[in-house]
Image (tube, rainbow, N blue to C red):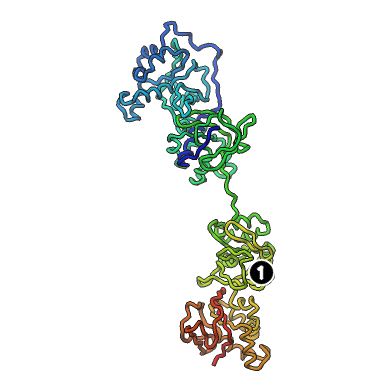
Amino acid sequence: MKTIEFFKTMKSRFNLIPIFILLMGIVVTTSCDNEDEDPMPENPMEKSIVDVAVEAGSFTVLIEAAQKAGLADFLSTEQNITVFAPTDDAFAALLTDLNLTSLDQVDAATLASILTYHVVADKVYSNNLSSGVVASANTNSPDSEPLSLLVNVGSDVMINNAKVTTADVMASNGVIHIIDKVLLPPSVVDIATYSDDFSSLVSAVVKADLAGTLSGEGPFTVFAPTNDAFAALFAALQISGLDEVSVEDLTSILTYHVVSDNVLSSEISAGTVEAVSGEELQITIDGAVMLNGTIKVIQTDIQGTNGVVHVIDAVLVPPTEKSNTIADVAVANSEFSILVEALMKADLVGAVADKEAELTVFAPTNDAFVALLSDLGANSLDDISVETLSNILLYHVIGSKAMSTDLTSGYYPTLSTFSGNSISMYVQVDGGVSINNSTMVTAADIEADNGVIHVVDKVILPPSVVNIAIDNANFSTLVSAVVKAGLVETLSGEGPFTVFAPTNDAFDALFAALEISGIDDLTAEQLIPILTYHVVSGNVLSTDLASGTVPTLSDGKHLTVDLSSGVMINDSQVLAADIQGANGVVHVIDKVLIPE
C-alpha cells in the first residue's frame, strides 16, 4: 500500500470526505422490453458524432471547443464512445459563471480536460444507464486513473449535476446524450455534492469549514460515510443531528476519514494506516475490506481530480485517550456514587475533572455519607443546601497533589474558604493517616491524571474554632477548660473569632505556677475571664496584626501585640499562625494569657 503522509493542514485533508461519499449510489437499473437491443438502429447516413453535432446546429461551441482542444478527429473517428454533449446555452452559462466572454480565454489543455470528461469509452444507451459511477475518458487524476461520472437515474437522468434532456442520438461511431450543463472535472468535494445520499457528510464538512481544504491539491483518499451511517451515529449518541456536535469534534471525526495520497482499492493491504488526524486506522481484508474491525467498505475507487473516495457503511469515530481524572475514578467506583451525586448537585464535577489541575481529594465512601445524613437528621442530599454541600466537599480537597508519603503531621489549606481564606485541615501521620483526629484514611494513593485520591471513612466537616481545638490532641486541656466554662456554644457560633490558643504545655506551666493539679482545681467563674481574654472579635490573620493593643471578649481587657521580634501576644509567643476555621482563625501560643 502506498505510504500515507500527514496533511500539512489537517482541516484541508478532511474537506474531501463528504464529496467522495456522494459518489456512492444504490444501483437502480432502468430497463426496456429488450435490454440487449439498441434502442435505435445505426444511422444509415454513417455520420460521426461531430457530423451529427454540426448538423444539429445547437452545438457550435462544443465543436469549436473540440477543434481548439485538438479533439475533433477523436470525436469523429474513435469508435463506440458515448458523449454527454452540452448545448450552446450550457456553454454560455459556464462562461458567465466563470466571468469569461468566450472560449478564447480558456487554454487548449483545460478545454481538452473538460471535453474528455464528457466522454465514456463505450457505447452506453439510455436503457443501459443505471445509478452509480461511470469512468470517463479523462485521466487527469493523481494516478492517471479515469475520473468518475456520477449517474443518478430517477424521474430524470442526471450526470453529476447536469440533466439529460435528449437521449440516444445515434452516430456512426457512438451515441450522444444531450445535457443542460457543462461537466467540470470534479474535486472530491464536488463529487460529494452531486448525491443526496451524502448530504449529512457535506453538511458536516461545511460546518467544520473543511470544504476549501478538501478542494485543494491533495491528493486525498477519503473513506466516506453515507447519510444512513451518520443517522446511526446520531442514534448511538442520542442526539438529533450535527447541530449538537461541536466544530472541534466534527473536525476530529472528519479528518479521521482521510489519509494522504491517492490509494486505490487494488493498493490497499491489511495493516495500519495513519489518518490526517494523526490516529491510526486498522485495515483487515477477508473477503471484504474492513476498517477498525467492524466498518465495511461498500464501494471503491470513485476518482476525483485530487483524490479517490471509498464509501463506508458507518462513521469512523477516532479513538480517544482514556480519561482518568479524579472525576472518572469516582464515577467508575460504585463506592463513591453518593460522592458523585453530591459533586453533581454542587456543580463541582468540572473542578475534579479538570485535567490541568493538581489535586488531593479525601474521598468519603457511601457509608460515610449515609452516616453523615443520619447525624444531620437528613433523608438525602436534597435536604442539604447547595452552599453547605459545596463547602463540605471543597473541604475534602487540597489544591496540590500529595501522595501519602508526602503527607506530614500538620495543617493543610483546603479549597473550602471562610472570609476568603482557605479553611485548614489537620493531618496526623502516625502509622496511618488521620484527618482532624477523627477520620481515617482507609485506602491511599489512588492516582489520577489530575491528582490523587485517599479514601476516608467519614465525611469531614469544616471546623469551627472549637472543633480545631477538639481535633488536635495538643489542645485537649484548652478544650476541657472551654467545656467547663460553658463556652463551647458561644465559640461555635457565627463569629468570626480570632483565638490565641495555648497548648497543653502552656496550661501545665500555668498549673505549676498556681500550684494546682489541673482544670479541676479551677471554677467556671475563674476560667471564663481567662478564656475570653484569649479571644478577639473578627477573623484576624497574622498578616493583619499590628503592634499595639487589641480589645478581647473579656470585658474591658486588652491584649498587647508586639511584632518587633516574631509575634508576641503579651509575654507569649505565637508558635503557629493562621489555622483557619469556618467561623474564625486560631493562632497557637506558648503561654496562657492572664488578664490583669
Left or right? Give the position of 129 relative to 469: left
Q: Quadrant of the N terminus?
A: top right
Q: Which of the 4 quarters of the picture holds residue 484?
A: bottom right
Depth check: give the residue in front, 541 or 1.
1
Number of marks in the rendered image? 1
Q: Position of residue 474 (x, y in %)?
A: 64, 80
| Residue 559 position (above or below residue 28) | below
| Residue 320 position (above or below residue 211) | below
Q: Which residue is mark 1?
A: 433
Q: Given the current orientation, which residue lies at the most extreme front position?
A: 3
| Residue 128 position (above or below residue 219) | above
Residue located at (57% from left, 57% from top): 353
Q: Position of residue 86 (x, y in %)?
A: 39, 21
Q: Quadrant of the C terminus?
A: bottom right
Q: Which of the 4 quarters of the picture holds residue 294?
A: top right
Q: Position of residue 465 (x, y in %)?
A: 58, 77
Residue 566 visible in the snapshot = yes
Q: Position of residue 76 (x, y in %)?
A: 41, 12
Depth check: give the residue in front, 110 or 180.
110
Element class at badge 1: strand
How packed mark 1 is, by other alpha carbons closer than 10 Å (few <14, some 14-19, many 20 or more), is many
Residue 207 visible in the snapshot = no
Disc 1 residue type? Val
